[in-house]
Amino acid sequence: MAAEIETMFYTREKPWHGLGVCVQEAPASEEALRLAGLDWEV
């Protein structure tokens, strides 16, 4: 099964697909967007 994920972050436990940036605690909104690779401008 393909994960079909380009960018993301996760907290504490690594997801089954092993992709993303690990953070220990849930970040604030702005930091979450940066970590997930979603901090682009339109």
Image (cartoon, grey):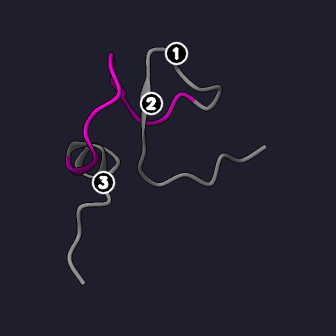
Residue 19 in the image, given as x and y percentages of width and height: 49, 35
Q: Which residue occupies 23% across, 69% down? A: 40
Is there a contact, CB below 8 Å, between mark 3 and mark 2? no
Q: Quadrant of residue 41?
A: bottom left
Q: CA distance from mark 3 to mark 1?
A: 19 Å
What's the mark number on residue 10?
Answer: 2
Seen as rendered, the residue at the extreme front is: 28
Residue 12 in the image, given as x and y percentages of width and height: 44, 15
40 horizontally vs 12: left or right: left
Q: Earlier in the sequence, mark 3 or mark 2?
A: 2
6 and 38: which is toward the camera: 38
Residue stretch rendered in magenta on the structure = 18-30
Q: Label 3 belongs to which residue?
A: 37
Mark 3: which amino acid?
Gly
Residue 23 in the image, given as x and y percentages of width and height: 32, 23
Q: Label 1 belongs to which residue?
A: 13
User: In the picture shown, does residue 29 fall above or below 21?
Assistant: below
Mark 1: which amino acid?
Glu
Q: How many marks can you see?
A: 3
Quadrant where the N terminus is found in the figure = top right
Q: CA distance from mark 3 to mark 2?
A: 12 Å
Q: Which residue occupies 62% across, 54% down? A: 4
Q: Is residue 29 magenta?
A: yes
14 horizontally vs 21: left or right: right
Q: Secondary structure at mark 2?
A: strand
Q: Secondary structure at mark 3?
A: loop
The residue carrying pointer 1 sits among few (fewer than 14), some (14 to 19) or many (20 or more) residues within 10 Å by Cα, namely: few
Quadrant where the C terminus is found in the figure = bottom left
16 and 28: which is toward the camera: 28
